[in-house]
Image (spheres, rainbow, N blue to C red):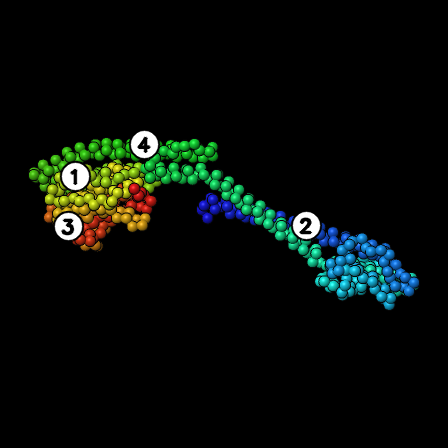
Amino acid sequence: MTSLRARFMLSILLWVGLGIAAIWYSSVRLFTTHVEAQYHEELEVHVRELGELTRLDRAGRPYLIRPVSDPRYGVPLSGYYWQVTRPGFGSITSPSMTRGALDYDIAHSPHILHRVENGPTGDAIVYGFIRQAAPGTPLHFVMATDERHMLRNIRLFTRELTLWLGLLAAALLASGMAIITLGLRPFRRLGAAVDALRNGRAARVDGDWPDEIAPLVQDLNAYAARNAQIVARGRVAAGALAHSLRTPLAIMVDEAERLAEGTAPEAARTLLDESERMLRQIDYHLARARSGGSRVGVAPLADPGTVLAPLVAAMGRCHPACAFVVLAPPGGFAPVAMDGDDLSEILSNLLDNAGKWARGRVTVSERRAGGAHALIVADDGPGLPPDRHEAMFAVGATGDTGGRSGSGLGLAIARDLARDYGHDLLMEPAPGGGLQLVLHFAEGNALDV
């Protein structure tokens, strides 16, 4: 799980759930214990009262000198019952017990005992004790209350408690979500700002930030500024180095050409070949050093349509027998997160390569499919076998036929520049014959207009 929001919500859900469950359990248990104690205390008091109110008539039969104090024992089948029994002399019962009887065997001790027994209207909590009656047979005093009354009170309390604790849990979760949303808002802003920085829509991260994030933003801005300085300085240094090397190499080539006309043609040819190889390496690494792209760098936005306009005009002059056609989609080309100079370098190499091999037409188009996005430079030339496509991207590789070969650097430089940004350059057979070079942009680096 990589989302901070999901982690926080899971933590809140866990702790709220555990807390609410603990409160629910402890409250229900405490209330149940309290209600049971209350019922037992009440029954014990009433059974003692029953014993105090009972008398024996002259025949030895029990009777009450007055009704018990709780009026519920006078309501028929109310669930509150009493019974006084003297074996051999009969029993008297509460007016509420219009049917059935209580088991007087529970009252078998002078001490008050209780248990759950079957009563006239269901399971009942029964209390009882015996008292010796002179002469002979003892009196059995039994007091009962239906267990359903106690269980109903517990059930009503549990239902009410569950409702309110459920509302409390919902309120706590909503509060937690609100806190997380507000707390993570600066991080969402920072993510959007970094995305704008990466895609070239901004040069730095601006805005007011919390104290916890401000140092990170400062370091990020310092890194972006430093990265831009390093790239600019590297380009200047690479150009200066290339210039300082080109002059001695040019002199060496001139001397080698003179030697080739003199007495050491083989040595001169070796010297010329090595000089040309050195020049290719300088050109290649100079082009790589001029690149502003990097997988972890900050790339501005480039508009392919704007970049293509001067390139097509220049290629028309370099290859006058070839027509360069730009097939822009409705609304124009989608801008890409790439340095404009680097995109120009790539496209110029692709157009120049296509112009060398085309019979009469080079087309530039765009292809979009789902999240994929690509620029395609296609020619109507003779093409190449598929097994040679990948080899053409090697440094120094050429398809020399008929004197149309170049230095063998263009496609290698173009692919390396593209891959610096996480993109790729591939060669495919063109649908109408010839070849097409496809510049695939990494998903998320091409922005819809």
Query: Who comes first in sequence, dot 3 or dot 4?
Result: 4
Relative to 358, say whether 110 is above or below.
Answer: below
Rendered image: mark on residue 229: 4
Disc 2 target residue: 30
Q: Nearer the viewer, residue 281 or 401?
A: 401
Instruction: Give the side of residue 89 with respect to residue 223, left or right.
Output: right
For residue 319, which quarter of the picture?
A: top left
Disc 3 target residue: 381
Q: Note whether residue 285 is visible.
A: no
Front position among marks 4 and 2: 2
Front position among marks 3 and 4: 3
Rendered image: mark on residue 313: 1
Relative to 60, say whether 191 is above or below.
Answer: above
Q: Position of residue 204 (x, y in %)?
A: 36, 33
Q: Residue at x 13, y 39 (%)?
A: 317
Front position among marks 4 and 1: 1
Q: Nearer the viewer, residue 15 or 78?
A: 78
Q: Residue at x 19, y 48 (%)?
A: 378
Query: Who comes first in sequence, dot 1 or dot 3?
Result: 1
Q: Amino acid at mark 2?
A: Leu
The span from disc 1 to disc 2 (Cα, nearest Å) is 89 Å
Q: Amino acid at mark 4?
A: Gln
Front position among marks 1 and 3: 1
Query: Who comes first in sequence, dot 3 or dot 2?
Result: 2
Q: Amino acid at mark 3?
A: Gly
Instruction: Give the side of residue 301 with respect to residue 32, left or right.
Output: left
Q: Position of residue 424 (x, y in %)?
A: 27, 46
